[in-house]
Image (spheres, grey):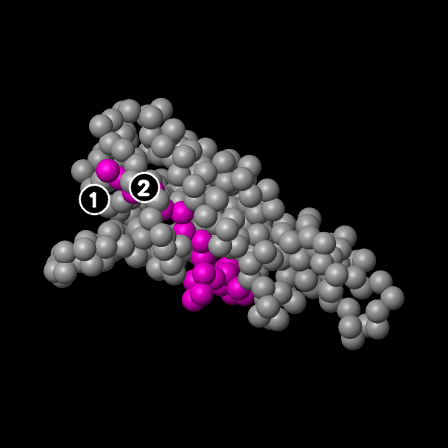
Amino acid sequence: MISYSLHLSNKKHALNTVKKVSTASKHNMRQFKSEDYCKDNIIVIRGSDNILEDVKKKYHEEFDEALVKYNEGKRSDRKIQDYLKYVSESGKNDVAAEIIIQLGDEEFWHDKSMNLQRKMVPILEEQVRHLEELVPDFKIVSAVVHLDEHSPHAHIIGVPIGRGYKRGMEKQAAKTKVFTQDTLKTLQDQMHKHAERDMEAHPEIFEGESLKEIEQGRNSDWSKEFYITGSYCRLKAEKSTGKKIEY
């Protein structure tokens, strides 16, 4: 059986400042690599190679009208001049949110060819479309597939939108309103079902495999590397057997 994970950025990995978004952009686009690094295994399926600029554009698109309305009649010292900067500096809301989707861990993918891994790109594109349909107030600005690590996975960054506020702007960046414990559970249930259907549609990758049941606590704040390298699965095995597993 293989695993499916949908991880929402949280706590120390939250995109709660402009600087954090810029760092995520550099990681996702491999901009910290040397010039001779081959980017053939980094596939951009949404957005540009500058995720921070994509976030800025989305802020203008989503919030400029609400910002003008909020500032009407206010003294200059009470106006918000730049909403993105305001959110980043206030510490009240996350600037953006990142979701990492992975179907199959390191154990499943370690002996699979790169050609098979590349066949995950349209499957992950479908996952992005399902995510948009299920969470329409998560405005996706970037989706990047990584095939250069231990397992294919997608990094999806977007701006969560909250509406109908009585205090402050009537429309705001609102990760905690869009992604609650209940909505995350529903989202995982639905995305898990889509993943099952994707597996059935691609026997050339998943023949003879079945998807593990959803487990509690899969949104814990593991690092990106923890999910991608298989350390999560190693920790689960250690807990179940009581033995430390060395690599």
Quick check: can you spot residue 39?
no
What quarter of the picture does the N terminus occupy? top left
Amino acid carrying label 1: it is Glu
Task: Find disc 2 in the rendering and name its residue.
Answer: 213
| Residue 151 can be seen, yes or no | yes
Q: Earlier in the sequence, mark 1 or mark 2?
A: 1
> Residue 206 appears at what percent x and percent y?
27, 30
The residue depicted at 36 percent of the width and 55 percent of the height is 217
Q: Secondary structure at mark 1?
A: helix
| Callout 2 secondary element | loop
Q: Position of residue 77 (x, y in %)?
A: 78, 75
Per the image, the residue denoted by label 1 is: 107
Task: Say if the magenta span includes residue 197.
Answer: no
- Please report the bounds of the magenta region as a residue range: 1-24
Amino acid type, callout 2: Glu
Residue 224 in which image quadrant = bottom left
